[in-house]
Image: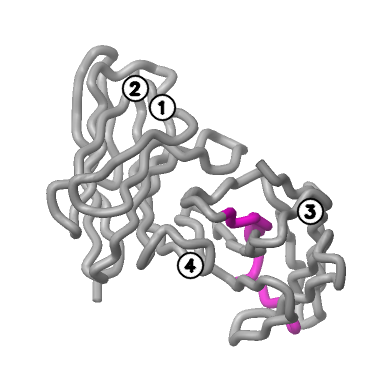
Amino acid sequence: DAKTTQPNSMESNEEEPVHLPCNHSTISGTDYIHWYRQLPSQGPEYVIHGLTSNVNNRMASLAIAEDRKSSTLILHRATLRDAAVYYCILREAGYALNFGKGTSLLVTP
Amino acid sequence: NAGVTQTPKFQVLKTGQSMTLQCAQDMNHEYMSWYRQDPGMGLRLIHYSVGAGITDQGEVPNGYNVSRSTTEDFPLRLLSAAPSQTSVYFCASSPSGGENNEQFFGPGTRLTVL
């Protein structure tokens, strides 16, 4: 089971970019890197995923290191609504999402 | 599309009671799964299904049963509730179990077992 390591918590000011790091040194060649977030009292919500190349969508960007042993989720302009727990997950060629404890992001006005 | 729906939103049970948590999706997704989330923790997989008639165990299956008779529905049954099953339960679905699919989560059922 490939694992990820994330900081327990991070803090950001509103309207500033946020870089959420994730280490996954034992990633295999077929593992996709997924990011989900969970707002307070809600179910997890998909954010973005990628395999080797950097990815952008309307919510965020995902920067993947060349050796794929780490990745960074980038929120370009944090808002108060982005305060959540962010989970970095390696999706293996099976079915389950392995959630860890994630990074709790605090956004201050 | 309603997405993934779960009922009830809240439930209180006494030890030893049984109940069924309902989960339904209207996206014609093949893959469905149940997770539980204890306070301050990440989600843990209970059971999953890759299609109608097929189910398998996840990380923490003890005390729970599932069945998948239709593509849309994936109920979770607690056979004899215990206080250790107090948790928030989330159902999720995705087009397939492949690693390139995103999962869609329901709003959760908050269960308390006294």
Q: Nearer the viewer, residue A61 or B81?
A: A61
Of the residues shown, which amino acid type is indicated by label 4?
Glu
Looking at the rendered structure, whether the residues under marks 1 and 4 are on a common chain is answered as yes
B85 displayed left or right of B27: right
Tell me, yes or no, whether the two marked residues, 2 and 3, touch with CB atoms within 8 Å.
no
Quadrant location, the N terminus of chain A: top right
Q: Amino acid at mark 3?
A: His
Look at the numbered disc 3 and give the secondary structure of its residue: loop
Check residue A76 for magenta coloring: yes
Q: Which mark is residue A4?
A: none
Q: Is residue B66 magenta?
A: no
Q: Residues within 10 Å of mark 3 (few under 14, many from 20)?
A: some
Cα separation, mark 2 vs mark 3, equals 37 Å
Residue range of the region highlighted in magenta in the rendering: A75-92
- Whether tag 2 and tag 1 are in contact, CB under 8 A, the answer is yes
Q: Nearer the viewer, residue A20 or B40?
A: A20
Check the picture and name the quadrant holding the C terminus of chain A: bottom right
Q: Where in the figure is residue B39, as x and y percent of width and height?
A: 55, 35
Q: CA distance from mark 2 to mark 4?
A: 32 Å
Chain letter of disc 2 in the image: B
Q: Is residue B106 above or below residue B19?
A: below
**Residue under numbered circle 4:** B102
Residue A52 on image: x %, y %? 73, 74
Q: CA distance from mark 1 to mark 3?
A: 32 Å
What subunit carries mark 3? A
Q: Secondary structure under badge 2? A: strand
Residue for badge 2: B113
The lab-note entry on whether marks 2 and 4 share a chain reads yes
